[in-house]
Amino acid sequence: MFTDFFENLKNELKKDLPGEKAHVKMAPGIRDYFKPNTKSRKAGVLILIYPKNQELHVAFIRRTEYNGPHSGQISFPGGKTEKEDFDIIQTALRESHEEIGIDPKKVKIFGELTPLHIPVSNFLVYPIIGRYENTPKFIADPTEVKEILEIKLKDLLDPTYCTTKEFNYGDISFLAPIYNPNNVTIWGATAMILSEFLEIVKKNRSKFLV
């Protein structure tokens, strides 16, 4: 099932990517677009696509509350590169295994999206796209993951779920573009990465059969 979708996705990822043009569409207005520097740390996140009830889904996590810039936010599973990681794909798979319990050996990798710099934490994030052939049996790491969110790809593609929301950052209030399927607020870097992924899917939606 969904063979054509994944074959076309693999082919599209070999072409020029939408990159920053897609990122900007979902960037908060106050975002500082400075470039990565020598102190930037690498991180890998996994855009995991899988079938559930005969529909394609994408896995997200809601991070636990902690004293840090990404506390409680929605994100893709993943994290920073460790010395033992031989490449960024291993980083994304290792971190995803730790956070949501998936088996890295069952993930088929299709490609990468454009790296995105996150100024507030100075990470350079590499999004990796992978497929699980069956519905995963998720196990959340309670120290890092408050909730695992399974969102239908067709809902992420629905333009009615792309809107704006007011946020507060210190004494500053600002509007930011968000995705809000199932009343889940996806914004910031995760929304920017998701924007590029969805641009690729929407580019040839008739071929993708989604």
Image (cartoon, rainbow, N blue to C red):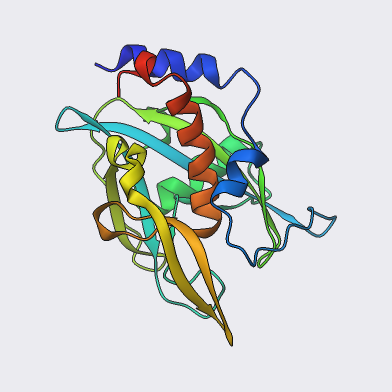
- Residue furthest toward the right? 38
State how many labels appear: 0
Residue in view at x 50 percent, y 32 percent: 199
Front residue (pair 90, 31):
31
In the image, taking residue 116 as reference, residue 58 lies left or right, namely left
Residue in view at x 64 percent, y 51 percent: 82
Front residue (pair 4, 50):
4
In the image, taking residue 8 as reference, residue 92 lies left or right, namely right
Q: Position of residue 2 (x, y in %)?
A: 29, 17
Q: Is residue 102 visible?
A: no
Residue in view at x 51 percent, y 63 percent: 176
Q: Position of residue 69 (x, y in %)?
A: 56, 72
Vertical relation: 168 (above or below) 202: below
Quadrant assignment for the C terminus = top left
Q: Quadrant of residue 172?
A: bottom right
- Residue furthest toward the bottom? 171
Front residue (pair 48, 87):
48
Front residue (pair 175, 74):
175
Q: Quadrant of residue 19?
A: top right
Q: Quadrant of residue 31?
A: bottom right
Residue in view at x 29 percent, y 51 percent: 181
Vertical relation: 24 (above or below) 165: above
Vertical relation: 6 (above or below) 118: above
In the image, taking residue 106 as reference, residue 26 lies left or right, namely right
Quadrant assignment for the N terminus = top left
In the image, taking residue 11 as reference, residue 65 lies left or right, namely left
Q: Position of residue 53 (x, y in %)?
A: 14, 32
Q: Position of residue 81 (x, y in %)?
A: 64, 50
Q: Is residue 46 visible?
A: yes
